[in-house]
Image: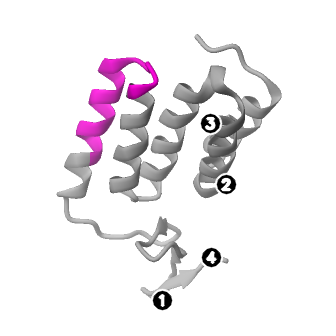
Amino acid sequence: MYPMNDDLRQAASMMSAGQYFEAASAFRAIYQSQPDHAAMAASQVGAALFFLRDFKDAIAWYQEAGRLGFDARMIQDNIQEAQQAMNQPYTPNVGDVVLFDNGQLMRFAENGTWQPLR
């Protein structure tokens, strides 16, 4: 178990609130600035990117977490889940937020189109 500090609590709150893009940024900052929490932060960047359907980068972050010593079984499960999700057809629901390959954060609108979130 990782001891929680204010940065971790705030990033975890963002994840719980579905603010995956913001959570990924917060966990990246923790990864960079808090070596004692780097492995856990990397795994959480992966999780946030997974929820944004950026599976390729999620897998890379999961692998980094594993390299840093995060729970190997959990990392393998997460990688497998991301690989499976990559190969599944995707039908968006209104309100879905996805990080596109070009780095644009988009939300699926009621009119059936993707709209920039920012």
Marks 1 and 3 sit apart, C-alpha to C-alpha, by 38 Å
Residue 117 numbered tag: 4
Name the quarter where the N terminus is drawn.
top right
Q: Amino acid type of disc 3?
A: Tyr
The residue sitting at 40% across, 59% down in the picture is: 54
Residue 66 shows in the view: yes
Local SS, label 2: helix
Which residue has dot 1 on it?
A: 111
Earlier sequence position, callout 2 versus callout 4 = 2
Span highlighted in magenta in the image: 67-82
Q: Amino acid type of disc 2?
A: Glu
Question: In which quadrant of the rendered view does residue 81 lie?
Answer: top left
Asked whether 68 falls inside the magenta stretch, the response is yes
Q: Nearer the viewer, mark 3 or mark 4?
A: 3
Mark 3 crowdedness (10 Å alpha carbons): few <14, some 14-19, many ≥20 = many
Earlier sequence position, callout 3 versus callout 4 = 3
Q: Point out residue 87 in the picture as x, y percentages from the top left corner.
A: 17, 57
Mark 4 crowdedness (10 Å alpha carbons): few <14, some 14-19, many ≥20 = few
Q: Nearer the viewer, mark 1 or mark 3?
A: 3
Residue 53 numbered tag: none
Mark 1 crowdedness (10 Å alpha carbons): few <14, some 14-19, many ≥20 = few
Q: Nearer the viewer, mark 1 or mark 4?
A: 4
Q: Point out residue 110 in the picture as x, y percentages from the top left corner.
A: 50, 82
Which residue has dot 3 on it?
A: 31
The residue sitting at 44% across, 72% down in the picture is: 100
Q: Nearer the viewer, mark 2 or mark 4?
A: 2
Q: Amino acid type of disc 4?
A: Leu
Which residue has dot 2 on it?
A: 22
Mark 2 crowdedness (10 Å alpha carbons): few <14, some 14-19, many ≥20 = some
